[in-house]
Image: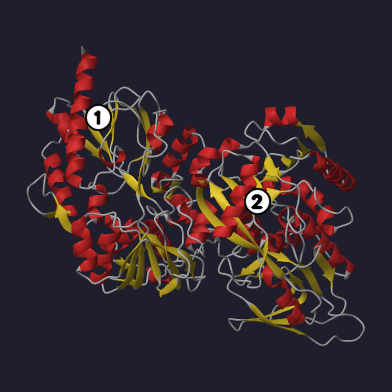
Amino acid sequence: MAAALSAYKNGVKDILILERDEYLGGILNQCIHPGFGIDYFKEILTGPEYARRFINKLEQVPRIEVSLRSFVVDLTKDKVLTFLKPGSFNRIKAKALIMATGCREKTREMVHIPGTRPAGIFSAGLAQKMINIEGLIPGKKVVIVGSGDIGLIMARRFVLEGAQVKAVIEIQKQSQGLLRNVVQCVQDYNIPFFCQHKISKIHGNSRVEKVSVVKVDKNFKTVANTEFEIECDSILISVGLIPENELIEMAGVKIDKNTNTPVYKGLNKTSIKGLFVCGNSYKVYDIVDSVSSDSEKAGQSAAEYLKRGKK
Amino acid sequence: MKIYDVIIIGAGVVGTAIARELSRYELKTAVLEKEIEPAFGVSKSNSGIIHPGTQNHCNSLKGRLCVEGNKLMRGIAHELGVDFKEVGELIVVFNKKDIPRLIKLKEEAEKLGVPKIQIVGRGWLKEHEPNLSKKAIAALYAPTAGILSPYRLVYDMIENAQNNGVEVYAQQEVIQIKPSKIRGSKKQGYFEIITSSKRKFKTKYIINSAGLFADDISKLAGIDDFKIKPRKGEEFILDKKKEHITNHLLFPLPAKKSKGVLIIKTSAGNPMIGPTACDCVDKYDLSTTDAGLKKVLSSVKRMIPSISHKDIIAYFAGLRPAAGEDFIIRHEDKVPGFINVAGIQSPGLTAAPAIALMACAILRQQGVNLKKKKIFHKTREKTTHLFEMPFSHTEKIIKEDPDYGDIVCRCEMVSAKEIKEAIKRGAKTLDGIKFRTRAQAGRCHGSFCTCRILKILAENSKRPITQITKKGAGSEIVLEKRCND
């Protein structure tokens, strides 16, 4: 939304936003905790409130077309997009394209945690969506793996929803999330926080029953005789975000295999002219305010690119 | 109470193949499955390889039925709309001293009738398997090896069997088998089967294809002369981006109890490495281990040095129902009417169509009149998958049914329509949806689509969302629902 508004402000009048979900706002809609907009709006907002500010701005500009439930299935190097909507198949060509596709989470499957594969293992974001958007409680006795921001936020959320958070398990020496989240989500709620620990085994055939936890050294190797068990019915995995750039990869954009982000000199630019990436799919930012600033720059770059093309 | 002609215990690849074969004949047939859906036992963890028949003793049932099954499977896959791809296999050696073993494998395979088998050298390997380690010196090439989706096959076979009149009862764990009294010299008797849900079934013949629990079932009938000793195999799935890292299935020389750690091409595109082979005691232990991962990685790096742990995107374990050296497929004369089809580990998937024919032959031998039905629906319409059709076709079907444009799983491109169709065809669980449609099997492993799938399952099966499970009772996903709609 920020990119679209910025492009419009910089002179582009023909803009389409393709959103795969049934509402605008993306992941912000499930981030019901406050702490957004301190930089950008100089206010403390919740995720949905922050998103609503941009939706309101968008509604003031009817020329920016919005297509919801639109799922892009193909992208070519000539910026031809194919997208599906319920009831329609569409193919369009973009003169300039801004990708704001965000991130997906690293899941249990991507890190080898030995043990079984029962029900009750969730990525933190999925649990967040289930609770905050769908009103479904996925667990009552939770162990959280990874102390990134999403894991910390969800630790507090589960407590507030009446669940027991048995532990937050972090493999590094210290939390990977913002300090304010460590304090406000874990310390304030007296949740046991184990740094330099990892889950050595998941137990339970049908549903999670317990986890085995061990201490690790600075090289992440298991320290002998430190194993203990925690009884639980759910495991939340919060071990990192992966920028979603599979579409631009399909189009042939050069991607850094380690970060999954485009390789190119120049902010928001990619190896395909006129194809820009912004927000978390460009770089994983800590706060949404940075995402908005970055996206506005991308909108401006796209506008400049189009102006240059018209000459 | 209805008396069935045949009841098959176990809806895995063997049970469903037999069911489908029997559905050609005018018989009252039913399948009893202890899990909530077919293929949730041993068959779920199958590698999907259709073996050419190498590595089996020429006098074994395994060997004979594998070669026969390999031929039959193509026709069946075609009839049922299951994708079968012939990719060929290479048994690779790195040491000159292993060549005689390779030659012996070739000779045994030829005796069995494995077609087109040949030994290839460095030059051939360099051209046809460019990523194979330069240290590989030769390989036994069996072109007739193929791959397909094992659970897709099970679902499509059981659906076809049902379409031809076979009844399927899930969540029916057999806990008692009572033979009735045999009247006179002619076998007029029947068995009474009681299941865990207190249901009773009467049948003239029982075919025991209960996989890991075949020995327990056999014992219920009074035959206690074999034991299923589970042998665990851990498998690790690689990123689809590595699909073309190999062109054939790669095998090492076989170990004593297993075919060794392989580099497998799967029908989904993702390569798979494994399995390990570790004798187990617990028939329910499906855990993966650090040791298993280490073993698999070190074994495959020998063949394809460029594979690293970073390529791994998923992993699982399965248990092979091992009962000695060979398959146990026989009528039990001590308990007339009871047929054991047990110990079906590798090459069980490949052999399944041939095992089905053998089961029919046993029934005929026992005097069952296998009368062909006048109408047998031999084909089944191929399941529609958006991800495997050209866009021109996608456009067409969305016009016909808007639900095809409603994408639920974005990683694998699965529409709401496909999910609803899977539910119509028998999916009751998240795993059932995953195995039938690939929704949740992609990059994000269900992070994006799980909510939606839960809702569609609850709506379409008219159950509360708190009763939707991953794989059957006890694996419920949602513990509590907060808001009322």
Q: Which mark is residue B48?
A: 2
Q: Is residue A278 left or right of residue A123?
A: left
Q: Is residue B119 left or right of residue B459?
A: right
Q: Position of residue B288 (x, y in %)?
A: 55, 61
Callouts 1 and 2 close, C-beta under 8 Å: no
Residue situated furthest top in the rendering: A311
Pointer 1 residue: A267
Q: Position of residue A218 (x, y in %)?
A: 39, 55
Mark 2 — on which chain does it sit? B
Q: Is residue A161 above or below residue B223?
A: above
Choose between B273 and B327: the one closer to the eye.
B273
C-alpha gap between disc 1 and disc 2: 46 Å
Q: Secondary structure at mark 1?
A: loop
Evaluate whether label 1 is on the same chain as label 2. no
Quadrant containing the N terminus of chain B in the rendered view:
bottom right
Which color mode does the image show?
A: secondary structure
Can I make out residue B165 in this image?
A: no
Residue situated furthest right in the rendering: B185
Q: Which mark is residue B54?
A: none
Mark 1 — on which chain does it sit? A
Residue B36 image-quadrant placement = bottom right
Q: Is residue A112 above or below residue A62?
A: below
